[in-house]
């Protein structure tokens, strides 16, 4: 399978003034000394029993309240990204909010999976970056390891803000923990290193519904490379970071019944400096 179909696609929030001259400081959050990550599974396809029709508005309210630097999204429709991008822009005035979406392929049809509203169904990421940030590169692919009993093929997606971070999202297989572990390992041990080799050694930040229950066997810790850290929601969602950042705090926030998953809010602090 072809790897790292990278493009200079910028789906939201660009300006002509991208990078100031001279050296830049290592990444911190646009509103403070940590990078705040909000991971959510919105169950918004319209097909699953967890669908309520309220999850996107609930996510927008949480973004307004918590002001995350990065938002990672599972089980969304393509149009949900632009709706939440507006919430991010309001929460972070004066910044750029870069976004990307990747549809989950539907094996029986060979096309994208669809929400009941006809839009593509998949995963998304939003990242608030300084106005001086360079144009992001978008990386993403279909996992070479799939659960052939599930018509929805699983994918991963990253937005790279140069000399800032790789903001990444994935949703691993839901019916086989062994395949979910293999997909997690593939992303962290193959895709992420290849991406950093091409784009630079910026921190990798992954928000995910890995479908690997915390404190079970196998658990998400089993797929982490040396130096990586993670925080979970006590169930199936994780925020994972490479060794340049460390977990400073973790909060599980209620979605008030709008979806069957809570939101996971994690603050990441810088551990090393890069030139």
Image: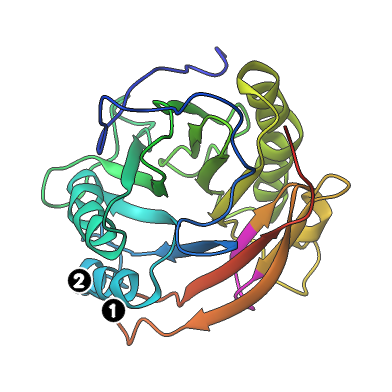
Structural crowding at the residue carrying mark 1, measured as other residues with C-alpha within 10 Å and reported as few (<14), some (14–19) or many (≥20)? many
Q: Which residues are magenta?
A: 232-239
Quadrant where the image shows the N terminus = top right
Left or right position of 209 against 229: left
Mark 1 or mark 2, which is nearer to you? Answer: 2
Quarter holding residue 72 = bottom left
Indicate yes or no whether the magenta region holds residue 233. yes
Looking at the image, do the residues carrying marks 1 and 2 touch, with CB atoms under 8 Å apart? Answer: yes
Q: Which residue lies at the image location 71% right of the left edge and 72% below the top edge? A: 214
Q: Residue 23 at x, y = what percent?
A: 61, 29
Residue at the spot of label 2 = 57
> In the image, is residue 193 above or below residue 255?
above
> In the image, is residue 219 above or below residue 106?
below
Quarter holding residue 105 = top left
Residue at the spot of label 1 = 258
> In the image, is residue 242 above or below residue 174?
above
In this rendered view, identify the residue nearer to me: 197 or 67.
67
Quadrant where the image shows the C terminus = top right
Element marked by disc 1: loop
Q: Residue furthest left?
A: 117
């Amino acid at each position: 399978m072809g790897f790292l179909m990278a493009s200079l696609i910028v789906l939201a929030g660009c300006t002509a003034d991208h990078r100031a001259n001279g050296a830049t400081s290592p990444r911190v959050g646009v509103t403070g000394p940590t990078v705040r990550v909000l991971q959510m599974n919105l169950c918004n396809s319209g097909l699953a029993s967890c669908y309520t029709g309220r999850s996107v508005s609930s996510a927008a309210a949480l973004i307004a309240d918590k002001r995350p630097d990065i938002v990672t999204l599972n089980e969304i429709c393509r149009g949900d990204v632009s709706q939440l991008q507006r919430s991010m822009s309001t929460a972070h005035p004066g910044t750029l909010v870069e976004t990307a979406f990747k549809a989950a392929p539907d094996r029986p049809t060979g096309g994208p999976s669809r929400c009941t509203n006809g839009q593509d169904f998949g995963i998304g990421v939003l990242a608030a970056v300084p106005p001086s940030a360079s144009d992001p590169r978008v990386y993403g692919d279909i996992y070479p390891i799939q659960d052939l009993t599930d018509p929805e093929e699983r994918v991963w997606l990253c937005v790279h803000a140069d000399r800032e971070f790789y903001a990444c999202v994935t949703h691993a297989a839901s019916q086989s923990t062994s395949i979910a572990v293999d997909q997690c390992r593939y992303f962290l041990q193959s895709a992420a290193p290849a991406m950093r080799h091409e784009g630079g050694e910026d921190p990798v930040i992954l928000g995910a519904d890995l479908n690997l229950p915390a404190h079970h066997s196998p658990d998400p810790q089993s797929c982490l490379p040396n130096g990586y850290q993670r925080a979970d929601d006590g169930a199936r969602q994780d925020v994972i970071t490479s060794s340049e950042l460390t977990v400073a705090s973790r909060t599980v926030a209620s979605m008030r019944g709008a979806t069957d998953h809570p939101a996971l809010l994690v603050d990441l602090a810088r551990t090393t400096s890069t030139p």
